[in-house]
Amino acid sequence: MAALVKVVKHCTREPHWIALYNGLIQTTLAQQQWGRLLHASLQRHNNGQFPLTKVCCNLIQSIRTIKQPNRTFHHTKVFRSSAQPSEEKVGTFTKIIEAMGFTGPLKYKKWKIKIAALRMYTCCVEKIDYEEFFNKLQIPDTFNSWFLVTQLHVWMCLVRMKQEGRAGKYMCYYIVYAMWEDAEQRGKVMGVNSLILKRSLRTLTEVFYASIFGYDEGILSDDHVLAAAIWRNLFETHCKDPRQLAVMVEYVRKQVQHLDAMSGEDLLLSGEVTWRPLVEPNPQSIVKPVSPVYNDEGL
């Protein structure tokens, strides 16, 4: 619903209404601040310093400046050896429709990205040796353990794809969507009661997003913080052998670097990822990832 700001010309007194989409401007300023901003903008317009069309633009910029205090924001990203790509530039129309909750035009077709997201999630569950994880880490072979190992690999894929701009973030949504669909189907196959399954999925949802924050903090910090996150989320505070934590810290670090070396374009079009072994035969080896093969249709 549009919020209307009435601007009255000083010379003709004719009312002009400018519609500003809700979401682009959040009216969180105090009434006195609004009054001062509008008065200053209109005075400058009446003095001929700039046209009326720039009044709202400067007003929006002023609001944005006031609403953004000086503080540091931390985002999950992996430091890459190559130069970081510049932020993707989008037009005004795309910004408007995305502020309204829709997805604007992307670099690649959306159906290709959806298929790639499904493939990437499939790589998280079919290319992982769960039995090796259960034996090496001494965790029980249960549905909950399967989910904890899966969410760790899904998180690493999310970290990688968020580096690919708007298309990567769009792909992240469908990776997580595929994970919940798979978890629900596995629960039904196991014969879990629908009511119990619904409650279990709600609990797993809370566990997943709590783990995301913990892993994000760990990957941006030193090995002690990452080990603590793995101990809380993967081992559920039941690990008593520090060597198991050391193995997992090394595993996560090398997997993130391995995914980071893969081509972003290949990942967006194919979704094919490979995983390093849990225990490296040669820890000093550097494996160059093989580029996936896909056709013109993205299949």
Image (tube, rainbow, N blue to C red):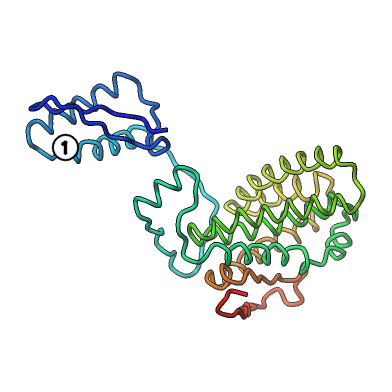
Image height of 239 relative to 44, above or below: below
Q: Is residue 13 left or right of residue 238?
A: left
Query: Which secondary structure, mark 1?
Result: loop
Residue sitting at x 19%, y 24%: 39
Q: Is residue 81 left or right of residue 31?
A: right
Say which of 278 and 50 sits in front.
Answer: 50
Residue ranking furthest to the front: 14
Residue sitting at x 45%, y 47%: 98
Say which of 160 and 123 sits in front.
Answer: 123
Residue 78, image x, y percentages: 54, 59
Q: Which kind of residue does numbered mark 1 sit on?
A: Leu
Residue 102, image x, y percentages: 49, 48
Residue ranking furthest to the right: 191
The quadrant holding residue 136 is bottom right
Residue sitting at x 33%, y 32%: 66
Residue placed under numbered mark 1 in the picture: 52
Residue 240, image x, y percentages: 84, 49
The quadrant holding residue 40 is top left
Residue sitting at x 43%, y 64%: 85
Check the picture and name the quadrant holding the C terminus. bottom right
Image height of 205 relative to 17, above or below: below
Q: Is residue 215 left or right of residue 240?
A: left
Q: Is residue 247 left or right of residue 23?
A: right
Residue 287, image x, y percentages: 65, 78
Check the picture and name the quadrant holding the N terminus. top left
Number of numbered discs visible in the structure rendering: 1
Residue ranking furthest to the top: 32
Say which of 247 and 146 sits in front.
Answer: 146
Callout 1: 10 Å neighbours few (<14), some, many (20+)?
A: some
